[in-house]
Image (tube, helix red, strand yellow):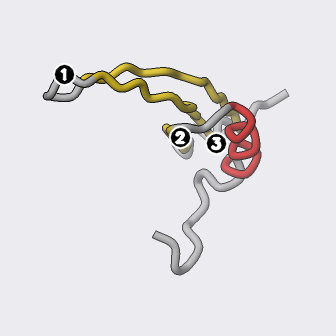
Amino acid sequence: MIVTRAAVALSFALSVTGPGGRREVLQGVFSWIAVGLDRPGERKDQVWFDLRAGLDRAEADLRERIHLVGRAPEPGTP
């Protein structure tokens, strides 16, 4: 077996404190995708921090994103 693509999504909670001392808790999902693992020198990695997202959404996003990493952007997209 040769692995060509890999992905993982992890939920997180992050506590931050602003200059005024107010504490906020940010929750979301960190996702990592790597493609081209079978082609040395051509590997592409991409990460996302999706705030206020759950693992259900992350699972759906991974299914789409794993095929987009490493492709040229569609015309008219930022």
Camera-nearest label, 1 or 2:
1
Q: Is residue 47 visible?
A: no
What is the quadrant of the C terminus in the image? bottom left
* Callout 3–callout 2 Cβ contact below 8 Å: no
Q: Residue at x 79, y 31 (%)?
A: 2
Question: Disc 1 versus disc 2: distance between alpha carbons?
Answer: 25 Å
Q: Name the foreground residue: 33 vs 64.
A: 64
Q: Residue at x 61, y 24 (%)?
A: 10
Disc 1: which residue: 21
Q: Name the foreground residue: 55 vs 5.
A: 55
Mark 1 is on which residue type?
Gly
What is the quadrant of the N terminus in the image? top right
Q: Which mark is residue 35?
A: 3
Question: Disc 3 versus disc 1: distance between alpha carbons?
Answer: 42 Å
Question: Disc 3 versus disc 2: distance between alpha carbons?
Answer: 20 Å
Whole-percent x, y for residue 54 in the image: 65, 33
Among numbered discs 3 and 1, the one appearing first in the sequence: 1
Number of other residues with Cα within 10 Å of mark 1, as a class: few under 14, some 14 to 19, many 20 or more: few
